[in-house]
Image (spheres, grey):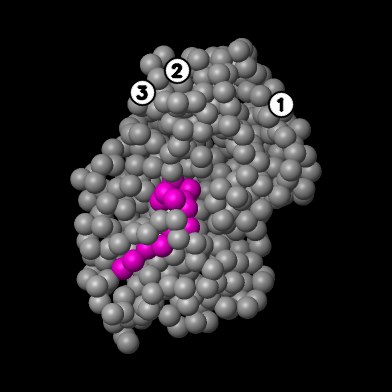
Amino acid sequence: MPSMLDAVVVGAGPNGLTAAAELARRGFSVEVFEAAETIGGGARTEELTLPGFRHDPCSAVHPLGIGSPAFAAMPLARHGLEWLQPELALAHPFPDGSAAILTGSVGESAMSLGPQDAGAYRRLLAPYLGHWDTLAQDFLRTPWDGLPRDPYHWARFGMSAIQPATLLARRFRGAKARGLFAGLAAHAIAPTSGIATGGIALLFALAAHENGWPVPRGGSQAISDALASYVRELGGAIRTGTEVKRLDELPPARAYVFDTSPTALARIAGLGHAYRGYRYGASCFKIDYALSGPVPWTAKEARRAGTVHVGPTAGEIEGALRAAVAGRDPSVPFLITAQPSLFDPSRAPEGRHVFWVYGHVPAGWKGDATDVIERQLERFAPGFRDLVLARAVAGPPQLAARNANYVGGDIACGAFAGLQTVIRPKLARVPYATAHPAVFLCSSATPPGPGVHGMSGHHAAKAVWRRLRAA
């Protein structure tokens, strides 16, 4: 091993591993340090309930993973990553037993919204179909990092994306289209009336039509394992069970890249109050279930979907998110659920199923939302509780203990609100660089933000190799 490494990466989540891979394949010597005993960060798989039931403690479905320019440039399939596509990407059920859906077909998805909104939905999405590759590269980055690859579609998409989802949804007349759109925007974990939430909804809808909303065979751990295998193939080393508290605990290196929260970075690297203005957002209450059978959704479409959004109307969804951000207890939560074992039998014993669900709650909330979540599930899947063999429950304190990046239980590692929506972690020409010339940040606190896509790690690595080559 050389006396001085080119780069040390702290944190073996998808962004840290992507940064390590990007640097290693350009010939730099790299070593990764992870505090937990296993790699993965927000992309891991564990037996949380009963033997043989393999759950994803955090992310489960990956529309931005299969569509990631960073992942596409790596031979992850050769390292064991296999995407499984559900029959339907998303179902959004309603109390009458019907459902809005997202599939690979824009027309089929549009028709599920009803005749009054089918045309409006097609008109909203049609200009971008076939342009995912350039749009992903142009939007999954810092807005001012060079000229867009496709200026026309970048500008057109951007004009819609910057709008609040509530404003963009005014083109729809019916409750189904508005509910579907609000549910997509809610992945931002912020009120749907906030700036750029329309862009979140558009991106997720376009992802469904272009690449699907797949699950990795075996669980989200497969993504992390494939990245780690590639890093090792390139000569990089990964050390687990090694918590880093100070920069001088790490081996000498020309650059240090942190897949951590800005708060942790400042503490470890001695940057003082460099990120004191950075805000963390609302949290989640997450339940992983071992079930004796598939979820008995009233809407038949929901029984064929990988992801099911539970909380029918745009008003209910907005109310649930506002309550979480304002610090109020959840009463009628909006739920994001996933049922991967319908499409990947390896996730549970034969005939059994794993089920993944979370609702939004205030940051640091110490209450128990199990009952309100299950009441909401029973509205759309009567008899659900009868199928529960075991449940693993994690509120904000447990989420924060499980992953240090989830400050206060914020799984997005930063609030999606105000200017921080587009400028994170703070205004800077290179947001991955810090006041310390050898220290960089690559977590989802940097552009383009949360999601298992590795793009924050990709862009941070680019900033690192530019610095190293200039030295």
- Picture quarter with the C terminus: bottom left
Which contiguous range is marked in magenta?
A: 30-43
Judged from the image, the secondary structure of the residue bearing numbered disc 2 is loop
Disc 1 crowd, CA 10 A, few/some/many (<14, 14-19, 20+):
few
Q: State left or right for residue 327 relative to residue 376.
A: right
Disc 3/disc 1 C-alpha distance (Å): 28 Å
Disc 2 crowd, CA 10 A, few/some/many (<14, 14-19, 20+):
some
Q: Which mark is residue 352?
A: 2
**Residue 319, percent from left and from top:** 73, 39
Residue for point 63% across, 28% down: 312
Q: Which residue is mark 3?
A: 345
Q: Which residue is mark 1?
A: 371
Residue for point 65% across, 18% down: 378
**Residue 251, percent from left and from top:** 38, 74
The reply to whether residue 85 is visible in this rendering is yes
> Which quadrant of the view contains residue 263?
bottom right
Amino acid at circle 1? Asp
Vertical placement of residue 430 versus 169, above or below: below
> Which quadrant of the view contains residue 285?
top right
Taking the magenta stretch, the answer to whether it contains residue 191 is no
- Picture quarter with the N terminus: bottom left
Q: State left or right for residue 96 relative to residue 250.
A: right
Disc 2/disc 1 C-alpha distance (Å): 23 Å
Give the residue furthest to the right. Answer: 328
The reply to whether residue 283 is visible in this rendering is no
Q: How many marks?
A: 3
Judged from the image, the secondary structure of the residue bearing numbered disc 3 is helix
Amino acid at circle 2? Arg
For the residues bearing labels 2 and 3, Cβ distance under 8 angstroms: no
Vertical placement of residue 219 versus 450, above or below: above
Amino acid at circle 3? Pro
Question: Mark 2 or mark 3, which has the lower sequence index?
Answer: 3
